[in-house]
Amino acid sequence: MPPIRAERLIRLSGSRDGVEWGKGCWRPPESTGAPGLPAAAPVRRLTAHPARNHLAGRSAFTPEGDALIFASDRDGPTQLFELRLQDGAIRRLTEGHPVQPFSAAVHHGGDKVFFARGGAIWVLRRSRLEENCVVSLGNTRLGPCALAGDWLAAPARQGRQYGFVIGRTDGSRWDFIALPRPVARLEFHPVEPEWLEIAFAGAPRMYRLRRDGAGLECLYPHGPDERVVHETFLGPTGDLVFALWPHALCRMDWESRQVRQIARFSSWHPASNPSGTLVVTDTHGPDEGIFLVDPVTGARQWVCSPEASNQGESWKPEGQQVAPETGWETRDLSWEWTHPHPLFSPDNSLIAFASDRSGTPQLYLATVGELPPPWFGPPPV
């Protein structure tokens, strides 16, 4: 498949604002303050276009921390954009068929961004604005990409068979690994990348298996009445943190599988900083805001209240609480745009998140390096 190259012309079309900026063209900054948003840290809004703007994936910052990769349907079909943090300028990175929302992963080198589009995985080179197909998987539905060095994987469905696809970023050694249930997400172990943590839809959720598909084993047996969600590795510690929604933020030892409660509150989408010394999480049911959490002591610091609508029937704290049985490849993602999904910058000083408080999902940035001491919060339970 031939590469898609940068376009230098600005084209007029039927986009949301009447003008479609050509791929590679820098748009004026949309960054403003965030008046009325309750916060302990300085917060600014990064986007303002009346479209669905959201973080492109779980590794949305560039390694240098100078830019943020996000997805938006501001020009029609969902595409990837780059926001330069120094001045707020925005440029479109991709074009053509729509990018799968939330599927992108920034390579550790910073120039390459991998993402799912249709039944294929693509790579964008930011320096050349060139898009190339890494691997075409035919009639396959794909979920969010996960990276470990030059290994790449994504949840997948081929016909009636669930599983994931895995291979090298140069397009070699690609396989479909069949699994018995739909896969919600997956992540490579940060220290031992021959292992993956697999999150199945439904219960029990947390499993691990080797890169070749061998050794599938459950990490945490639980029933459908216990909502285990959004697990992720705690930096290079190799431990997992996850939300036992809406009751607690928990930590699991990868080797012993011992689980301990870090703090008792309605943690929802936890994410680790690169060193594994802090966790950032939004909350829901009740929504108390975004917090920084010490994974050792459980002490937490309130950052802000994003005031997102947090839509989705499966996230109502009252009544039915059974986890959905569908994976990313079949789920309606319309409500995901209304969730904050906070993420750390590489240097731990910034937190990016989304909020639809203005009516459409926009990106925000909190400067947590300026939070005043001391931290506050309930003692660990």
Image (cartoon, rainbow, N blue to C red):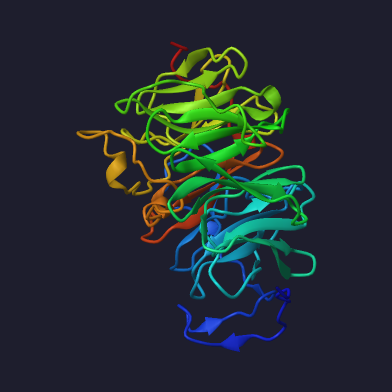
Q: How far across and down, in percent of the image, does residue 250 sit?
A: 48, 21
Q: Position of residue 167 (x, y in %)?
A: 70, 48
Residue under the image location 64 percent in, 54 percent down: 68
List the single residue furthest toward the left: 319
Quick one: 18 or 240, which is closer to the camera? 240
Residue 65, position as x, y percentages in the image:
72, 48
Q: Is 290 or 9 nearer to us in this picture?
A: 9
| 197 relative position to 162: left or right | right
46 over 211 or under it: above or below: below
Q: Could one spot residue 288 in this view of the protein? A: yes
Q: Quick one: quadrant of the C terminus?
A: top left
Furthest residue toward bottom: 12
Instruction: Judge whether 349 appears above or below 378 on screen.
Output: below
Q: Residue visible at 44% across and 31% down? A: 205
- Image position of 359 with respect to 205: above or below: below
The quarter holding residue 148 reads top right
Task: Please state, as top left, top right, bottom left or bottom right, where the N terminus lies in the image.
Answer: bottom right
